[in-house]
Image: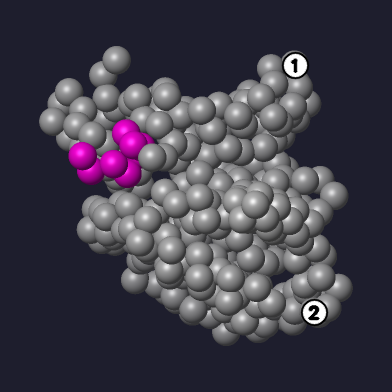
């Protein structure tokens, strides 16, 4: 009886999380989103007018975490060595990691939210056992935001909020609009789709943009039209990455007029099969214990590939 009650409680919680997915971005927009967007545009004009366009960095890299993230600075532990590898491998770049891609207001799940108490409990449980069923609620909640971003109805309000957070973070880190310094969005898992959605609005600022996707489940978002290039790194045993090719009709070969098809036709999408990675659990992209035939860990294979793309050198994949 207790087990049945618990299962019913979890089911109700899941339904609540699903219902709140699109409502969060719509509520943000109706409450203060439009006003904040207008204020941001005005501030950007002022910033651009007085900017001397000088920066000490050759490029900016914005890392958007996967669906396991709690907030902009609290990522699953397996991602930390990867982030460190980017920082060490591209010292001339400014690495931005403080954007939470699953909130239009950049508020982490444990911040001032109606259900923050629940997410704090879940975070504690996840630290004890990352694979606990309760911890999977974080993945579910954030995955719903991924689909909100990809939705043609709700996506615009969500994506303009995310773009605003990315842009404000870039400015905090010293980016100068009009400088022509390129910005690379690095999106892992759901972070790749969030990057696509934000790219449409970021592109309005004329920032040179590109995307590196790691196992991303991406749609045929219009943001593709504002990206100079998309580099998609995928594992051959990753079932979730493959879902993107199935779930989003704009990526089907017959969708000849979609943004995805346009980008493919213009040679703006490059796909790398970097090895037999799975999406999570084991033998995943950031697994330090899975060793490739060339002696590198899967973590190093993935980080080497991203660093190579950022440095303009050849990507070394696991031989098949």
Label number found at residue 254: 1
Mark 2 or mark 1: name the one nearer the start of the chain. Answer: 2
Residue annotated with mark 2: 32
- Marks 2/1: CA distance? 40 Å
Q: Is residue 115 magenta?
A: no
Q: Secondary structure at mark 1?
A: loop
**Residue at coordinates 63% horizontally, 65% vertically from top-left?**
103
Predominant SS of the magenta segment? loop
Task: Name above or below for residue 270 compared with residue 161.
Answer: above
Residue lying farthest to the front in this orientation:
1
| 311 and 293: which is toward the camera | 293
Count of numbered circles on the image? 2
Is 287 one of the magenta-colored residues?
Answer: yes
Percent across and percent down for residue 130 are: 39, 54
| Closer mark to the observer between disc 2 and disc 1 | 2
Q: Quadrant of residue 59?
A: bottom left
Highlighted magenta segment, given as a residue range: 282-289
Q: Position of residue 89 (x, y in %)?
A: 24, 53
Q: Position of residue 91 (x, y in %)?
A: 25, 61
């Amino acid at each position: 009886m207790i087990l049945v009650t618990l299962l019913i409680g979890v089911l109700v919680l899941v339904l609540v999380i699903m219902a709140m997915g699109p409502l969060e971005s719509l509520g943000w927009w109706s409450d203060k989103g439009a006003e904040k967007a207008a204020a941001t545009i005005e501030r950007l004009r002022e910033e651009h007018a007085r900017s001397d366009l000088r920066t000490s960095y050759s490029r900016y890299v914005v890392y958007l975490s996967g669906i396991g993230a709690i907030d902009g600075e609290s990522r699953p532990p397996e991602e930390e060595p990867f982030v460190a590898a980017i920082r060490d491998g591209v010292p001339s770049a400014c690495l931005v990691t403080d954007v939470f891609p699953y909130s239009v207001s950049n508020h982490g799940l444990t911040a001032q939210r109606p259900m923050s108490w629940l997410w704090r409990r879940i975070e504690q449980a996840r630290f004890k056992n990352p694979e606990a069923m309760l911890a999977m609620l974080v993945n579910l909640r954030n995955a719903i935001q991924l689909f909100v971003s990809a939705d043609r109805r709700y996506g615009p309000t969500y994506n303009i909020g995310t773009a605003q957070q990315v842009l404000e973070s870039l400015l905090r880190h010293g980016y100068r609009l009009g400088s022509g310094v390129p910005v690379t969005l690095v999106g892992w898992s759901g972070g790749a789709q969030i990057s696509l959605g934000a790219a449409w609005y970021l592109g309005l600022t004329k920032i040179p943009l590109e995307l590196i996707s790691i196992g991303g489940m991406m749609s045929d978002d219009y943001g593709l039209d504002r990206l100079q290039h998309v580099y998609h790194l995928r594992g051959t045993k990753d079932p979730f990455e493959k879902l993107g090719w199935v779930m989003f009709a704009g990526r089907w070969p017959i969708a000849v007029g979609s943004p995805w098809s346009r980008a493919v036709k213009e040679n703006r999408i490059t796909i790398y099969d970097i090895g037999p990675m799975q999406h999570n659990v084991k033998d995943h992209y950031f697994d330090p214990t899975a060793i490739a035939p060339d002696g590198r860990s899967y973590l190093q294979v993935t980080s080497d590939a991203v660093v190579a793309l950022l440095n303009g050198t050849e990507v070394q994949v696991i031989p098949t």
